[in-house]
Image (cartoon, grey):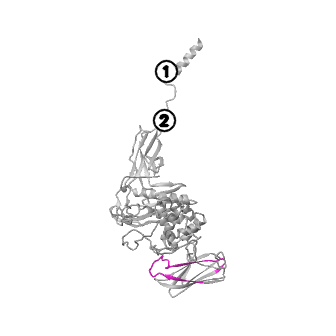
Amino acid sequence: MRRLSLLSMLVAAACGGGSGRPTGPPAPVIDTIRTFQGHVGYYVTGPRMSTRDASGRLLPETGFAAPNLPRNGPRFAVDVLSSTGQLLGSTTTDTNGNYSIQVNFGKNPAAPVRVRTAARATIAGGTDLRVLPNLSSADPYELSSPLTTDPDLPTTRIDLAIRLDQGSGAFHILETLFAGLSAIRGGVTGTVPDLDVLWEPGNGAVSSFTAASPQLGRLIVAGGVAGDDASNQDAWDDPKLLRLLGEYFLAYFSNSVAPPGNPADSLIVPSAAWREGFLDFFACAAHGTPEYWDTEGIGAAGRVVRFFVAESFFDPALGSLGPDDPNVYQDPAVVGIGSRFTTTEVLWDIFDGGSQDADNDDISVPLFLMLKDLEALQPGASYPYIYSALDEYVGNLSFSNVQADVLLEFPENHDLGYPPDSETVWPTPFDDPSRLDGTVIPPYDETIADMIDDTAGAQLGLYAQRYFKVRVAAQATLLATVTSAASLRVEILDLENNLISAGTGSATTVTSGDEFVIRVLPAAGPVSAPFDLRVQLTP
């Protein structure tokens, strides 16, 4: 009887009987998890690349396509922010511009938030890419949604579409350069520096690249002149943007040693031909098409000012082009180590494959592997030109000597063969024929006859400045003397293009053994004259 009474009391207590008040803790309030998802896109404009004549030439005054429906924004940064700007969640869009973020609202499910996309991205390996209006800007371009609150909905959809007047050009720059940086990242070793891009409509700038520091590269992209739709604007020129990125690659991972001056489409100094030809090639390869274009203006005032197809620069109707024709064709005489066209076309033929391999050369080396091999062309190691690259590719078994020789002769004959002969080794070497390594030992006295021709006033003309090299194997005084009816300047340079000594008629330096480049160029005014260059080494 007593046990039954005790059991009854326990049941009553468990049921809260007697007091009318709960005796346990209050039920917990569960955090609210909400999902935000949507699509990010941007409005685009650009040249109409399909307007061509019967022969396939691009017509010069083609205008620009009108801004159309938003283009997908791939790999763009997306954030969810509180009303005070606190970061609540981050992600990146997928390749189709879609995103999804889960945010924990804790005990405040009705808190207002906004979704933001920004012109910044991180490449695999941790390289940051940002597009900023100018140097004084701390933050990249961005677009945010209005504040929103949907506490009763587990999923909220917010789409963002960046218009032209909201900086869509910045997002196009971001997308284009992300692809190029990814190709570089896949091919090089070591740290890939961050990249800031400065672009703003009406900035009046000239597009350029600067290695701001070992950790940061900087591109300036032309935004035109305010109020002048016909002025140069490069935000929509994918190949031009990627060409600038090619300068980034050369500066940080390879070799950009070349004399200053505006490159022409005629024969130029081989290292300048290499630089210009590589940049054109990289622009096409990173874009995945042999077509290159550069435009000026925007909207109805937009026009294509330079256009070529890297697969082949030759055209049977050469000579019938008008002065305003944007199509670039190669004079059959402009071939060889001084031709930027030869460099671009040979590199493209190494890269292309599948449906793009119009010449069926059976060579197809991925871009990242091509870049990896070019890392060997470091400043201080060589003055690079087309054979420098071919030597690396053949040496690393990307293709054979025979295939390299075919590349230089078919489908276009570039008047070259592989390996190079004595006429195409550059700079022209002074050497001791009795030494297999090509070095010279003092005492040494040798003269090479050559020709200078700068009558056209071409700063980078192949014959406007002549290059020679000498490898000294022991301590000596090096004296380079030029004899000519013309007044000529002699410069002694190291392999990083740093000037060591110079003078009219002669230059000298003391060395403990090194490799030098000797440059001969007009001392004043355009000249055309033969000369003898004498190199003397005295212990």
| Mark 1 burial class by Cα count in 10 Å: few <14, some 14-19, many 20+ | few
Q: Badge 1 is on which residue?
A: 19
- From this viewpoint, is residue 293 visible? yes
Start-end of magenta stretch: 447-476
Quadrant of the frame with the C terminus: bottom right
Q: Badge 2 is on which residue?
A: 30
Amino acid at the residue labelled 1: Ser
Residue lying at 32% horizontally and 62% vertically, measured from the top left: 300
Q: On the rendered structure, is 45 left or right of 183?
A: left
User: What is the CA distance from the residue labelled 2 to the residue labelled 1?
Assistant: 29 Å
Q: On the rendered structure, is 521 left or right of 317?
A: right
| Badge 1 element | loop
Quarter-of-image position of residue 385: bottom right
Q: Does the magenta segment cover residue 470?
A: yes
Q: On the rendered structure, is 85 left or right of 483?
A: left
Vertical order, 216 against 382 (above or below): above
Amino acid at the residue labelled 2: Ile
